[in-house]
C-alpha cells in the first residue's frame, strides 16, 4: 500500500511538472502575442511590460525572464512583423506582371486590404510609432521601415521598366505611407469620412482612393519609359 501511495504521489508530481513545463514552453508565444496587441494600442513610449503581462495573463517577471526588457520585446515583435509582411507582400505581387496595370494594381490592393483586415496590428504599430521614431530611439523600428525597401526590390524585380525612373522610389514610398495610414489609423479616417472603419464600405473607399491617386502616376511612368 505504501509503495502504491508513493507511485500515486510520483504520478501526481509528474503530471504537475509536465503541465508546468508545457506552460513554460508556451509562455514566450503568449508574451509575443500579448505584446503585439498592446503595442498596437499604445506607442512604444507609453506601453509597459505590466500591460503586456496583464494581456497575456502571466506573471510580470516572466517577461523579463524570457526577453529581458520592453526594448528587446518590441524589437522581437518588429522583426516578426517584418518577416510576416515580406512573405505576404511577395504573394500580393504574384502574377501582377502578367496583367494590365489597372488590373494589377486593383488586385494588389485587394490582397493588401484583405490581409490588413485579418492582421491590423502591424499597420497600427507602424502608424503609432512613426512620428516618435524620428525623435527617439525605438529598438527594432528599423525592421518595420525596411519593408519599404523590400517593396522597392520586388517592384524592380517584377517591373524593371520602372527601375531607373527618378520618381519611382518617391511614388512607392508615398503609396506605402499613405496605405499604412489609411489602414493603421482607420478610426481617424473613418470619422473624417463618416464611414465605419470596420465595414467593407471603408475598405472599398481606401482602395478607390489609392487607385485614383496612384494609377495615373504609374501609367505616366510606364508611358514615359516606353517613349525613351
Image (cartoon, helix red, strand yellow):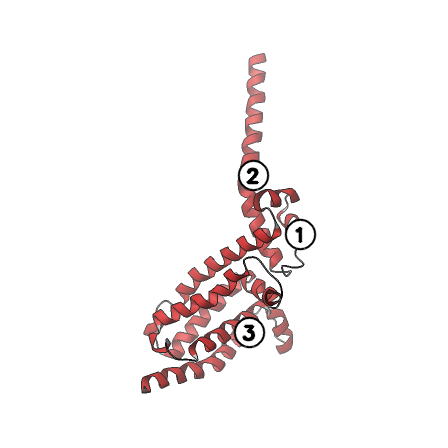
- Identify which residue is drawn at 57% across, 67% down: 184
Q: Which one is in front in this view, the residue at disc 2 or the one at disc 3?
A: 2
Q: Residues within 10 Å of mark 1 (few under 14, many from 20)?
A: some
Q: Residue furthest bottom?
A: 227
Q: Is residue 66 visible?
A: yes
Q: Position of residue 117 (x, y in %)?
A: 53, 64
Q: CA distance from mark 1 to mark 3?
A: 33 Å
Compare marks 2 and 1 and give the one earlier in the sequence: 2
Q: Are marks 1 and 3 in contact (CB under 8 Å)?
A: no
Q: Which residue is mark 1?
A: 51
Compare marks 2 and 3 and give the one earlier in the sequence: 2
Q: Is residue 59 visible?
A: no
Location of residue 64 with respect to 87 vertically, above or below: above
Q: CA distance from mark 2 to mark 1?
A: 20 Å
Q: Which one is in front in this view, the residue at disc 1 or the one at disc 3?
A: 1
Tell which of 104 and 156 is nearer to you.
Answer: 156
Tell which of 62 and 91 is nearer to you.
Answer: 62
Q: Position of residue 178 (x, y in %)?
A: 53, 74
- Identify which residue is drawn at 49% across, 68% down: 113
Q: Which mark is drawn over residue 24?
A: 2
Amino acid at each position: 500500500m505504501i509503495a502504491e501511495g508513493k507511485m500515486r504521489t510520483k504520478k501526481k508530481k509528474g503530471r504537475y511538472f509536465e503541465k508546468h513545463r508545457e506552460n513554460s514552453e508556451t509562455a514566450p508565444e503568449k508574451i509575443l502575442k500579448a505584446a503585439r496587441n498592446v503595442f498596437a494600442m499604445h506607442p512604444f513610449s507609453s506601453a509597459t511590460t505590466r500591460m503586456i503581462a496583464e494581456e497575456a495573463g502571466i506573471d510580470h517577471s516572466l517577461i523579463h525572464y524570457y526577453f529581458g526588457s520592453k526594448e528587446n520585446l518590441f524589437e522581437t515583435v518588429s522583426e516578426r512583423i517584418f518577416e510576416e509582411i515580406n512573405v505576404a507582400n511577395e504573394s500580393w505581387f504574384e502574377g501582377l506582371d502578367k496583367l494590365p496595370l489597372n488590373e494589377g494594381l486593383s488586385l494588389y490592393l485587394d490582397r493588401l486590404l484583405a490581409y490588413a483586415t485579418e492582421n491590423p496590428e502591424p499597420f497600427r504599430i507602424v502608424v503609432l510609432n512613426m512620428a516618435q521614431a524620428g525623435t527617439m530611439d525605438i529598438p527594432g523600428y528599423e525592421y518595420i521601415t525596411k519593408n519599404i525597401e523590400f517593396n522597392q526590390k520586388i517592384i524592380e524585380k517584377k517591373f524593371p521598366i520602372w527601375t531607373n525612373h527618378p520618381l519611382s522610389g518617391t511614388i512607392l514610398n508615398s503609396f506605402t505611407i499613405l496605405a499604412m495610414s489609411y489602414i493603421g489609423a482607420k478610426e481617424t479616417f473613418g470619422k473624417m469620412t463618416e464611414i465605419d472603419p470596420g465595414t467593407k464600405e471603408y475598405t472599398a473607399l481606401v482602395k478607390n482612393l489609392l487607385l485614383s491617386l496612384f494609377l495615373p502616376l504609374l501609367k505616366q511612368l510606364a508611358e514615359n519609359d516606353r517613349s525613351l
